[in-house]
Protein backbone atom coordinates (compact mmCIF):
# COMPACT_ATOMS: atom_id res chain seq x y z
CA UNK A 1 0.00 0.00 0.00
CA UNK A 2 1.31 3.40 -0.92
CA UNK A 3 0.97 5.92 1.87
CA UNK A 4 0.94 9.65 1.94
CA UNK A 5 3.70 11.48 3.82
CA UNK A 6 2.88 11.78 7.53
CA UNK A 7 0.09 14.20 8.13
CA UNK A 8 -2.84 14.89 10.35
CA UNK A 9 -6.61 14.90 10.28
CA UNK A 10 -8.72 12.99 7.82
CA UNK A 11 -5.76 11.90 5.67
CA UNK A 12 -5.16 9.14 8.20
CA UNK A 13 -8.64 7.80 7.45
CA UNK A 14 -8.30 8.09 3.68
CA UNK A 15 -7.31 4.42 3.06
CA UNK A 16 -10.74 3.44 4.43
CA UNK A 17 -12.64 5.80 2.10
CA UNK A 18 -13.08 3.42 -0.89
CA UNK A 19 -14.54 0.73 1.35
CA UNK A 20 -16.86 3.26 3.00
CA UNK A 21 -18.09 4.45 -0.40
CA UNK A 22 -18.83 0.89 -1.50
CA UNK A 23 -20.59 0.05 1.76
CA UNK A 24 -22.73 3.19 1.66
CA UNK A 25 -23.53 2.75 -2.04
CA UNK A 26 -24.40 -0.92 -1.65
CA UNK A 27 -26.54 -0.40 1.45
CA UNK A 28 -28.46 2.54 0.05
CA UNK A 29 -29.02 0.70 -3.21
CA UNK A 30 -31.04 -1.97 -1.41
CA UNK A 31 -32.82 0.53 0.87
CA UNK A 32 -33.99 2.98 -1.79
CA UNK A 33 -36.54 2.60 -4.58
CA UNK A 34 -35.32 1.01 -7.84
CA UNK A 35 -35.42 4.28 -9.76
CA UNK A 36 -32.89 5.89 -7.36
CA UNK A 37 -29.38 5.23 -8.65
CA UNK A 38 -26.35 5.09 -6.37
CA UNK A 39 -23.87 4.54 -9.19
CA UNK A 40 -21.75 7.64 -8.30
CA UNK A 41 -20.76 5.98 -5.00
CA UNK A 42 -19.57 2.89 -6.87
CA UNK A 43 -17.70 4.93 -9.47
CA UNK A 44 -15.99 7.01 -6.76
CA UNK A 45 -14.60 4.01 -4.84
CA UNK A 46 -11.84 2.84 -7.27
CA UNK A 47 -11.04 6.44 -8.22
CA UNK A 48 -10.52 7.24 -4.52
CA UNK A 49 -8.29 4.17 -4.14
CA UNK A 50 -6.03 4.98 -7.08
CA UNK A 51 -3.91 7.86 -5.64
CA UNK A 52 -2.81 6.22 -2.38
CA UNK A 53 -3.50 2.50 -2.39
CA UNK A 54 -1.75 -0.33 -4.24
CA UNK A 55 -2.59 -1.51 -7.74
CA UNK A 56 -4.19 -4.71 -6.45
CA UNK A 57 -6.31 -2.94 -3.84
CA UNK A 58 -7.49 -0.53 -6.52
CA UNK A 59 -8.35 -3.49 -8.74
CA UNK A 60 -10.18 -5.15 -5.84
CA UNK A 61 -12.32 -2.08 -5.18
CA UNK A 62 -13.02 -1.78 -8.91
CA UNK A 63 -14.14 -5.40 -9.10
CA UNK A 64 -16.41 -5.00 -6.06
CA UNK A 65 -17.94 -1.85 -7.58
CA UNK A 66 -18.69 -3.65 -10.86
CA UNK A 67 -20.17 -6.61 -8.95
CA UNK A 68 -22.43 -4.34 -6.91
CA UNK A 69 -23.78 -2.51 -9.95
CA UNK A 70 -24.30 -5.87 -11.66
CA UNK A 71 -26.26 -7.12 -8.65
CA UNK A 72 -28.33 -3.95 -8.76
CA UNK A 73 -29.19 -4.55 -12.40
CA UNK A 74 -30.30 -8.12 -11.66
CA UNK A 75 -32.50 -6.91 -8.81
CA UNK A 76 -34.39 -4.21 -10.69
CA UNK A 77 -34.41 -5.96 -14.13
CA UNK A 78 -33.82 -2.80 -16.20
CA UNK A 79 -33.79 -2.59 -19.96
CA UNK A 80 -30.73 -4.04 -21.66
CA UNK A 81 -29.33 -0.66 -22.80
CA UNK A 82 -29.65 0.78 -19.28
CA UNK A 83 -27.88 -2.19 -17.72
CA UNK A 84 -25.07 -2.05 -20.27
CA UNK A 85 -24.60 1.69 -19.72
CA UNK A 86 -24.47 1.44 -15.92
CA UNK A 87 -22.20 -1.61 -15.77
CA UNK A 88 -20.02 -0.22 -18.56
CA UNK A 89 -19.69 3.14 -16.78
CA UNK A 90 -18.51 1.58 -13.52
CA UNK A 91 -16.22 -0.87 -15.33
CA UNK A 92 -14.62 1.85 -17.45
CA UNK A 93 -14.02 4.01 -14.37
CA UNK A 94 -12.42 1.01 -12.63
CA UNK A 95 -10.05 0.57 -15.58
CA UNK A 96 -9.31 4.30 -15.55
CA UNK A 97 -8.52 4.06 -11.82
CA UNK A 98 -5.96 1.33 -12.54
CA UNK A 99 -4.29 3.45 -15.22
CA UNK A 100 -4.26 6.43 -12.84
CA UNK A 101 -2.72 4.25 -10.13
CA UNK A 102 0.10 3.18 -12.47
CA UNK A 103 0.82 6.75 -13.55
CA UNK A 104 0.98 7.98 -9.96
CA UNK A 105 3.19 5.04 -8.92
CA UNK A 106 5.72 5.90 -11.61
CA UNK A 107 5.65 9.56 -10.58
CA UNK A 108 6.27 8.55 -6.96
CA UNK A 109 9.22 6.40 -8.04
CA UNK A 110 10.76 9.33 -9.92
CA UNK A 111 10.29 11.63 -6.93
CA UNK A 112 11.80 9.06 -4.58
CA UNK A 113 14.79 8.66 -6.91
CA UNK A 114 15.27 12.44 -7.05
CA UNK A 115 15.17 12.63 -3.27
CA UNK A 116 17.75 9.86 -2.91
CA UNK A 117 20.06 11.67 -5.34
CA UNK A 118 19.52 14.97 -3.49
CA UNK A 119 20.29 13.33 -0.14
CA UNK A 120 23.46 11.75 -1.56
CA UNK A 121 24.65 15.09 -2.92
CA UNK A 122 23.77 16.78 0.37
CA UNK A 123 25.82 14.28 2.37
CA UNK A 124 28.76 14.62 -0.03
CA UNK A 125 28.79 18.42 0.18
CA UNK A 126 27.95 18.64 3.90
CA UNK A 127 29.46 15.54 5.53
CA UNK A 128 28.51 14.47 9.03
CA UNK A 129 30.93 15.73 11.70
CA UNK A 130 32.68 13.23 14.00
CA UNK A 131 30.95 12.33 17.26
CA UNK A 132 33.81 13.83 19.29
CA UNK A 133 35.73 16.99 18.53
CA UNK A 134 38.11 18.08 21.25
CA UNK A 135 36.22 18.17 24.52
CA UNK A 136 32.88 18.31 22.74
CA UNK A 137 30.43 15.56 21.89
CA UNK A 138 28.77 16.39 18.58
CA UNK A 139 25.62 15.47 16.65
CA UNK A 140 24.23 16.98 13.44
CA UNK A 141 21.02 16.51 11.52
CA UNK A 142 19.77 17.65 8.14
CA UNK A 143 15.98 17.36 7.97
CA UNK A 144 14.48 17.86 4.52
CA UNK A 145 11.02 19.31 4.17
CA UNK A 146 8.60 16.52 3.25
CA UNK A 147 7.20 18.36 0.26
CA UNK A 148 10.59 19.29 -1.13
CA UNK A 149 12.89 17.18 -3.29
CA UNK A 150 15.38 19.95 -4.08
CA UNK A 151 18.89 20.16 -2.68
CA UNK A 152 18.91 22.62 0.19
CA UNK A 153 21.30 25.38 1.14
CA UNK A 154 21.76 24.52 4.82
CA UNK A 155 25.28 23.81 6.05
CA UNK A 156 27.22 22.97 9.17
CA UNK A 157 30.78 22.12 10.16
CA UNK A 158 32.80 21.46 13.32
CA UNK A 159 36.60 21.51 13.36
CA UNK A 160 39.34 21.21 15.95
CA UNK A 161 41.91 23.90 15.19
CA UNK A 162 45.04 25.33 16.82
CA UNK A 163 42.76 28.02 18.30
CA UNK A 164 40.15 25.69 19.76
CA UNK A 165 37.04 24.03 18.39
CA UNK A 166 35.27 26.13 15.77
CA UNK A 167 31.72 25.58 14.54
CA UNK A 168 29.64 26.91 11.68
CA UNK A 169 25.96 26.70 10.83
CA UNK A 170 24.57 28.62 7.85
CA UNK A 171 21.67 28.92 5.47
CA UNK A 172 22.13 29.94 1.84
CA UNK A 173 19.32 31.78 0.14
CA UNK A 174 17.60 29.59 -2.44
CA UNK A 175 17.84 25.92 -3.29
CA UNK A 176 19.14 23.70 -6.03
CA UNK A 177 22.57 23.59 -7.62
CA UNK A 178 23.25 27.32 -7.17
CA UNK A 179 22.76 27.03 -3.42
CA UNK A 180 24.86 23.86 -3.32
CA UNK A 181 27.72 25.68 -5.05
CA UNK A 182 27.60 28.42 -2.41
CA UNK A 183 27.55 25.79 0.35
CA UNK A 184 30.68 24.17 -1.08
CA UNK A 185 32.44 27.55 -1.36
CA UNK A 186 31.60 28.57 2.20
CA UNK A 187 32.54 25.25 3.77
CA UNK A 188 35.86 25.23 1.92
CA UNK A 189 36.60 28.78 3.03
CA UNK A 190 35.64 28.00 6.63
CA UNK A 191 37.82 24.89 6.84
CA UNK A 192 40.83 26.75 5.50
CA UNK A 193 40.36 29.96 7.48
CA UNK A 194 39.53 28.14 10.73
CA UNK A 195 42.98 26.52 10.65
CA UNK A 196 44.88 29.68 9.70
CA UNK A 197 43.24 32.67 11.38
CA UNK A 198 43.79 33.25 15.12
CA UNK A 199 40.77 35.58 15.36
CA UNK A 200 37.22 34.37 14.75
CA UNK A 201 36.34 37.68 13.10
CA UNK A 202 39.01 37.04 10.48
CA UNK A 203 37.48 33.65 9.74
CA UNK A 204 34.20 35.37 8.92
CA UNK A 205 36.05 37.99 6.85
CA UNK A 206 37.82 35.27 4.85
CA UNK A 207 34.53 33.55 4.16
CA UNK A 208 33.01 36.85 3.02
CA UNK A 209 35.92 37.61 0.72
CA UNK A 210 35.91 34.12 -0.78
CA UNK A 211 32.19 34.27 -1.41
CA UNK A 212 32.44 37.65 -3.15
CA UNK A 213 35.35 36.46 -5.27
CA UNK A 214 33.60 33.27 -6.33
CA UNK A 215 30.45 35.19 -7.09
CA UNK A 216 32.39 37.38 -9.51
CA UNK A 217 34.08 34.39 -11.15
CA UNK A 218 31.06 32.11 -11.44
CA UNK A 219 28.30 32.86 -13.97
CA UNK A 220 25.87 30.64 -12.02
CA UNK A 221 25.95 32.81 -8.89
CA UNK A 222 23.96 36.02 -9.15
CA UNK A 223 24.24 38.93 -6.75
CA UNK A 224 21.67 37.50 -4.36
CA UNK A 225 22.23 33.75 -4.62
CA UNK A 226 25.15 33.94 -2.22
CA UNK A 227 23.16 35.79 0.43
CA UNK A 228 23.89 33.55 3.45
CA UNK A 229 23.04 33.81 7.10
CA UNK A 230 25.58 32.16 9.38
CA UNK A 231 26.69 31.82 12.97
CA UNK A 232 30.28 30.97 13.91
CA UNK A 233 31.20 29.71 17.37
CA UNK A 234 34.62 29.16 18.90
CA UNK A 235 35.43 27.30 22.10
CA UNK A 236 39.07 28.08 22.88
CA UNK A 237 41.33 25.85 24.91
CA UNK A 238 41.81 28.61 27.47
CA UNK A 239 39.50 29.32 29.18
CA UNK A 240 37.64 26.11 28.29
CA UNK A 241 34.21 27.30 29.41
CA UNK A 242 34.15 30.62 27.55
CA UNK A 243 32.88 30.62 24.00
CA UNK A 244 33.05 33.33 21.35
CA UNK A 245 30.36 33.84 18.75
CA UNK A 246 29.79 35.85 15.57
CA UNK A 247 26.28 36.03 14.17
CA UNK A 248 25.73 37.17 10.58
CA UNK A 249 21.96 37.56 10.41
CA UNK A 250 21.26 34.04 11.65
CA UNK A 251 18.80 32.73 14.28
CA UNK A 252 20.50 32.86 17.71
CA UNK A 253 21.87 29.62 19.20
CA UNK A 254 20.24 28.11 22.27
CA UNK A 255 22.25 27.23 25.37
CA UNK A 256 20.64 24.42 27.36
CA UNK A 257 22.09 24.04 30.85
CA UNK A 258 22.22 20.73 32.68
CA UNK A 259 19.64 22.16 35.10
CA UNK A 260 17.10 22.55 32.27
CA UNK A 261 17.47 26.32 31.89
CA UNK A 262 17.49 27.35 28.23
CA UNK A 263 18.16 30.75 26.71
CA UNK A 264 19.33 32.37 23.48
CA UNK A 265 22.84 33.65 22.87
CA UNK A 266 22.49 36.97 21.10
CA UNK A 267 25.34 38.61 19.22
CA UNK A 268 25.95 41.98 17.59
CA UNK A 269 23.60 42.70 14.69
CA UNK A 270 25.33 42.20 11.34
CA UNK A 271 24.37 41.60 7.74
CA UNK A 272 24.53 38.08 6.31
CA UNK A 273 27.60 36.91 4.44
CA UNK A 274 27.75 38.18 0.88
CA UNK A 275 26.23 41.61 1.58
CA UNK A 276 29.32 43.54 2.67
CA UNK A 277 28.97 45.74 -0.40
CA UNK A 278 25.89 47.23 1.24
CA UNK A 279 27.56 47.95 4.55
CA UNK A 280 31.19 47.44 5.59
CA UNK A 281 31.35 45.61 8.91
CA UNK A 282 34.13 44.37 11.16
CA UNK A 283 33.00 41.45 13.26
CA UNK A 284 33.48 41.64 17.02
CA UNK A 285 32.84 38.31 18.74
CA UNK A 286 30.33 38.11 21.57
CA UNK A 287 31.43 36.04 24.55
CA UNK A 288 29.34 33.77 26.74
CA UNK A 289 29.81 31.06 29.34
CA UNK A 290 29.49 27.49 28.13
CA UNK A 291 29.55 25.42 31.34
CA UNK A 292 30.50 21.77 31.52
CA UNK A 293 27.50 19.52 30.99
CA UNK A 294 25.57 22.11 28.97
CA UNK A 295 24.40 21.72 25.37
CA UNK A 296 24.63 24.27 22.61
CA UNK A 297 22.07 24.04 19.79
CA UNK A 298 22.73 25.78 16.47
CA UNK A 299 20.03 25.62 13.80
CA UNK A 300 18.67 27.19 10.62
CA UNK A 301 15.41 29.08 10.25
CA UNK A 302 13.58 25.93 9.18
CA UNK A 303 13.30 25.36 12.95
CA UNK A 304 12.53 28.85 14.24
CA UNK A 305 10.08 29.64 11.42
CA UNK A 306 8.07 26.43 11.71
CA UNK A 307 4.45 27.28 12.54
CA UNK A 308 1.50 25.50 14.07
CA UNK A 309 -2.07 25.57 12.77
CA UNK A 310 -2.63 28.98 14.40
CA UNK A 311 0.47 30.49 12.78
CA UNK A 312 2.54 30.51 16.00
CA UNK A 313 6.28 30.19 15.37
CA UNK A 314 8.30 27.47 17.04
CA UNK A 315 10.37 28.89 19.92
CA UNK A 316 13.39 26.61 20.51
CA UNK A 317 14.44 28.14 23.85
CA UNK A 318 10.94 28.07 25.31
CA UNK A 319 10.33 24.51 24.11
CA UNK A 320 13.64 23.29 25.57
CA UNK A 321 13.20 24.91 28.97
CA UNK A 322 13.08 22.29 31.74
CA UNK A 323 14.20 19.58 29.32
CA UNK A 324 17.19 17.50 30.32
CA UNK A 325 19.17 15.42 27.86
CA UNK A 326 22.29 13.38 28.25
CA UNK A 327 23.75 13.48 24.75
CA UNK A 328 23.62 15.72 21.64
CA UNK A 329 21.88 13.03 19.58
CA UNK A 330 19.17 12.81 22.20
CA UNK A 331 18.73 16.59 22.01
CA UNK A 332 18.34 16.47 18.23
CA UNK A 333 15.81 13.65 18.42
CA UNK A 334 13.81 15.65 20.93
CA UNK A 335 13.89 18.84 18.84
CA UNK A 336 12.97 17.14 15.55
CA UNK A 337 10.06 15.23 17.09
CA UNK A 338 8.85 18.37 18.84
CA UNK A 339 8.97 20.67 15.81
CA UNK A 340 7.27 18.10 13.58
CA UNK A 341 4.48 17.78 16.15
CA UNK A 342 4.28 21.58 16.44
CA UNK A 343 3.96 21.88 12.65
CA UNK A 344 1.19 19.34 12.41
CA UNK A 345 3.25 16.44 11.15
CA UNK A 346 5.28 18.10 8.38
CA UNK A 347 7.90 20.78 7.80
CA UNK A 348 7.58 23.63 5.32
CA UNK A 349 11.31 24.26 5.00
CA UNK A 350 14.52 22.27 5.30
CA UNK A 351 16.41 22.62 8.55
CA UNK A 352 19.92 21.86 9.75
CA UNK A 353 20.72 21.22 13.40
CA UNK A 354 24.06 21.04 15.17
CA UNK A 355 24.21 20.13 18.86
CA UNK A 356 27.33 19.97 21.00
CA UNK A 357 27.76 19.00 24.64
CA UNK A 358 30.57 20.48 26.67
CA UNK A 359 32.46 17.89 28.66
CA UNK A 360 35.84 18.72 30.17
CA UNK A 361 36.88 15.06 30.05
CA UNK A 362 35.42 14.39 26.58
CA UNK A 363 33.05 11.70 27.91
Image (spheres, grey):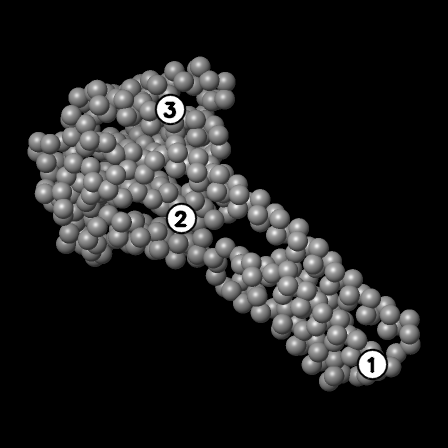
Q: Which residue is mark 1?
A: 74
Are the residues at dot 2 and dot 1 in contact (C-beta closer than 8 Å)? Answer: no
Q: CA distance from mark 3 to mark 2?
A: 28 Å
Q: Residue at x 58, y 69 (%)?
A: 16
As drawn, the label of residue 306 is 2
Disc 3 marks which residue? 185
Point 28% across, 37% down: residue? 129
Q: Quadrant of residue 162?
A: top left
Residue 275 placement, left or right of 255:
right
Q: Is residue 177 left or right of residue 101?
A: left
Question: In this rendering, would 53 be left or right of 142?
Answer: right
Please tell me which residue is depicted at 22% across the width and 23% down the height of the picture: 195
Q: Nearer the viewer, mark 1 or mark 3?
A: 1
- Count neighbours of disc 1 (C-alpha within 10 A) and say few if under 14, some if 14 to 19, many if 20 or more: few
Q: Secondary structure at mark 1?
A: helix
Do the residues bearing badges 3 and 2 touch, measured as CB atoms within 8 Å? no
Distance between mark 1 and mark 3 Cα atoms: 73 Å
Q: CA distance from mark 2 to mark 1?
A: 57 Å
Amino acid sequence: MRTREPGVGWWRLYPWLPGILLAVGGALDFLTPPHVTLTPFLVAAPIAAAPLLSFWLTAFYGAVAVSLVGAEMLRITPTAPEAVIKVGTVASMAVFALLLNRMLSRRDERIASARRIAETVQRAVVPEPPERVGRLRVAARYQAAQRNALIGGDLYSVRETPYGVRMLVGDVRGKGLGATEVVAVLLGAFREAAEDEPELGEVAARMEATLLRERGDSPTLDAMEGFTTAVLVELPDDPPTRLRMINRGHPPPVLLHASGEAHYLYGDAALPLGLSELHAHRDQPTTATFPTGAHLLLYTDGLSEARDADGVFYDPAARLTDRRVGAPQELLDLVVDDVVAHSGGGLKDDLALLAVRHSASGD
